[in-house]
Amino acid sequence: MRLTQTFAAGAFLFVMPFAFVQAGTLDTVKQRGHVQCGVNTGLPGFSFPDDTGRWSGLDVDVCRAVAAAVFGDAEKVKFTPLNAKERFTALQSGEIDVLSRNTTWTQTRDTSLGLNFTGVTYYDGQGFMVKKNLGIKGAKELDGAAVCIQAGTTTELNLDDYFRTNNMKYSPITYDKGAETVKGFEAGRCDVLTSDQSQLYALRIQLKDPDSAMVLPEVISKEPLGPVVRQGDDEWFNVVKWALFAMVEAEDLGVSSQNVDEMKANSKNPSIRRLIGLEGIAGKGLGLPDDWAYQIVKQLGNYSEAFERNVGQGSPLKISRGLNALWTAGGLQYPPPFR
Ligand SMILES: N[C@@H](CCC(=O)N[C@@H](CS)C(=O)NCC(=O)O)C(=O)O
């Protein structure tokens, strides 16, 4: 065999394991009867199991939205809790159909890892939490700090960039699990804990004494968090992508879980009628029932309802919409047209 042939055969064998699980995810999911969704092991507001094992959170609701679209039943989903290091392998290997786990959309992940981000569930950015008694008021005062951090995250990389750019030194104290990272911070193993800002709010309220810590004002990175699927399966990519858009479009059109039935019965607005499948392209092209988006809104609500319930004013986190407001309210959430 010539060298180029040997290389081609080797490359083929290398990509084979992923090729088996690339296409046909929608059919596989339909046959199996549920969506298998990878989520965080326990991050309040995003994915968190209660005492009975029931999951809730914004990332969890995205999984449920996909189930509502495919099956007309938001409950037809099972959750696989994953830490940062294992999340991509679980998706590549086909163990899960979609990853919805506070995962930042980056070039490497969207290309070399063989994955596709389908949208942005939450626009985040990296921040720092410090013990108040250190008297630190800003991130530039962190020179020489010991920093608690989680392995396998963009957080690790941004931290390094930030300290290098500002000519500062730090000692990383690295953990594999979120819970260990917080324990390390509480036990005084580090001066500062860094992660996506949304998580800092969630982690702070889990501390034994939340008032002993504060989040510094600086945001040092862009962290667009979104659902992820495997490359090479456009049909499934589209389903996950448009499930999230349906929630945002519903908010944009003023359609909610409370009024969607009334809209279905009476609305003459063509945009609303198209969203809920009464006219236009509906489920064709997605391989879904015509009422797929109606089911999402009826069962989970629009993006605003999901946001407020999980991380906003209806939750202990009380995060304001900020960048996650609709484009019409100064934010970045902007669904493409449903037509
Ligand atoms: N958005 C970042 C960070 C994601 C991440 O895993 N953050 C940690 C920091 S607290 C986390 O969620 N840990 C919870 C866990 O693994 O249990 C990324 O995609 O790399």
Image (spheres, rainbow, N blue to C red):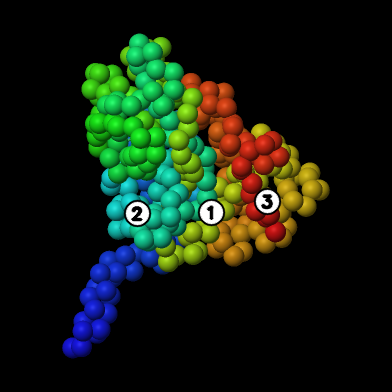
- Which of the pair 109/72 is nearer the observer? 109
SS type, badge 2:
helix
Instruction: Report how many numbered discs are placed on residues in the image.
Output: 3
Residue 241 numbered tag? 1
Choose the circle earlier in sequence order: 2 or 1: 2
Q: How far apart are the alpha carbons under marks 3 and 2?
A: 30 Å
Asked whether mark 2 and ligand 1 are closer than 8 Å, the reply comes as no
Q: Amino acid at mark 3?
A: Leu
Please say whether residue 82 is visible from this viewpoint: no
Q: Indicate which label's residue lies in the foreground, 3 or 2.
A: 2
Q: Is residue 254 left or right of residue 237?
A: right
Asked if the residue at tag 3 contacts the one at tag 1, i.e. Cβ–Cβ closer than 8 Å, the answer is no
Which residue, as the protein is rendered here, is positioned at the far left?
1
Which residue has dot 3 on it? 275
Q: How far apart are the alpha carbons under marks 1 and 3?
A: 15 Å
Neighbourhood count class around disc 2 (C-alpha, 10 Å): few under 14, some 14–19, many 20 upward: many
Asked whether mark 3 and ligand 1 are closer than 8 Å, the reply comes as no
Residue sitting at 50 percent across and 53 percent down? Answer: 118
Toward which corner of the image does residue 148 lie, by quadrant? Answer: top left
Residue 91 numbered tag? 2
Toward which corner of the image does residue 51 lie, by quadrant? Answer: top left
